[in-house]
Image (cartoon, rainbow, N blue to C red):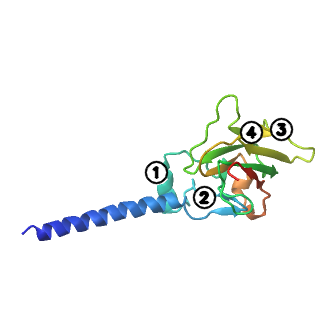
């Protein structure tokens, strides 16, 4: 007597639960299509525009973040180093080279979910183009480690995976079709505490 309604109910629960789960996994797996990869750095230039695909729009609305429009800037994220190794909060890194032209840029560290890592006072949790020391040729070297370093240094002390986020503000790069020709900073692992 109750066999048919119970089977229908179980089927609906599985279908609804599976649908919600698969949609959630899909939205967390990507920020949409149209990614630009330059070494380990990845950007989504169309993410905030009217040309964004449905997955990108859903991802954007789910995050609740205000993103930069194409004319305002571009956000590059790296979750691997130059050799393809996953970035870890237990390791030390050096980011060196040049950034694409921009009026202003910031470099910060986030956890694997994109939440910025905080550093206890007075340690720096990020650097900007205004407070980064440069060599005579305009290049820079930034150390990211748990131990303080002379020069440009960001404190990196986390238990899991991390990502480096380079935000370019007011940059001609955002409207450029030649994104593939840009020189991006190099990310090299310099050691790990677990090794």
User: Local crowd at mark 2 within 10 Å, few (<14), some, or many (≥20)?
Assistant: many
Q: In which image quadrant can residue 189 be found?
A: bottom right
Q: State how far apart marks 3 and 4 are (Cα).
A: 13 Å
Q: Is residue 8 above or below residue 136?
A: below
Q: Position of residue 122 (x, y in %)?
A: 70, 28
Q: Residue beneath label 4, please? A: 147
Q: State how far apart marks 2 and 4 are (Cα).
A: 38 Å
Q: Of discs 3 and 4, which sits in the foreground?
A: 4
Q: Earlier in the sequence, mark 1 or mark 4?
A: 1
Residue in the foreground of this view, choosing between 166 and 173 = 166
Q: Secondary structure at mark 2?
A: loop
Q: Residue beneath label 2, please? A: 46
Q: Position of residue 48 (x, y in %)?
A: 57, 53
Q: Residue beneath label 3, please? A: 151
Q: Residue beneath label 1, please? A: 62
Q: Residue at x 20, y 64 (%)?
A: 9
Q: Of discs 2 and 4, which sits in the foreground?
A: 4
Q: Position of residue 136 (x, y in %)?
A: 93, 44
Q: Is residue 30 above or below residue 72?
A: below
In this rendering, would 151 be left or right of 70? right
Q: Earlier in the sequence, mark 2 or mark 4?
A: 2
Dot 2 and dot 4 residues touching (CB under 8 Å): no
Q: Of discs 1 and 2, which sits in the foreground?
A: 1
User: Local crowd at mark 3 within 10 Å, few (<14), some, or many (≥20)?
Assistant: few
Q: Earlier in the sequence, mark 1 or mark 2?
A: 2
Q: Earlier in the sequence, mark 3 or mark 2?
A: 2
Q: Residue at x 22, y 66 (%)?
A: 10
Q: Secondary structure at mark 3?
A: loop
Q: Is residue 48 above or below residue 169?
A: below
In this rendering, would 138 be left or right of 191? right
Q: Secondary structure at mark 1?
A: helix
Q: Secondary structure at mark 4?
A: loop
């Amino acid at each position: 007597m109750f066999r048919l309604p119970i089977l229908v109910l179980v089927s609906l629960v599985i279908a609804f639960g599976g649908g919600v789960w698969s949609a959630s996994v899909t939205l967390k797996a990507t920020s949409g299509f149209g990614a630009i990869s330059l070494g380990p750095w990845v950007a989504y230039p169309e993410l905030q525009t009217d040309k964004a695909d449905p997955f990108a729009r859903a991802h954007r609305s789910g995050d609740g973040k205000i993103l930069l429009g194409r004319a305002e800037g571009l956000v590059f994220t790296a979750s691997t180093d130059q050799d393809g190794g996953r970035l870890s909060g237990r390791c030390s890194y050096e980011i060196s080279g040049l950034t694409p032209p921009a009026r202003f840029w910031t470099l910060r560290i986030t956890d694997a979910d994109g939440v910025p890592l905080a550093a206890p006072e007075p340690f720096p949790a990020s650097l900007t183009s205004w407070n980064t020391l440069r060599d005579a040729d305009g290049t820079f070297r930034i150390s990211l480690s748990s131990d303080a370093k002379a020069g440009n240094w960001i404190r990196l002390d986390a238990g899991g995976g991390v990502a480096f986020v380079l935000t370019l503000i007011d940059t001609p790069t955002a409207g450029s079709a030649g994104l593939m020709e840009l020189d991006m900073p190099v990310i090299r692992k310099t050691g790990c505490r677990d090794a």
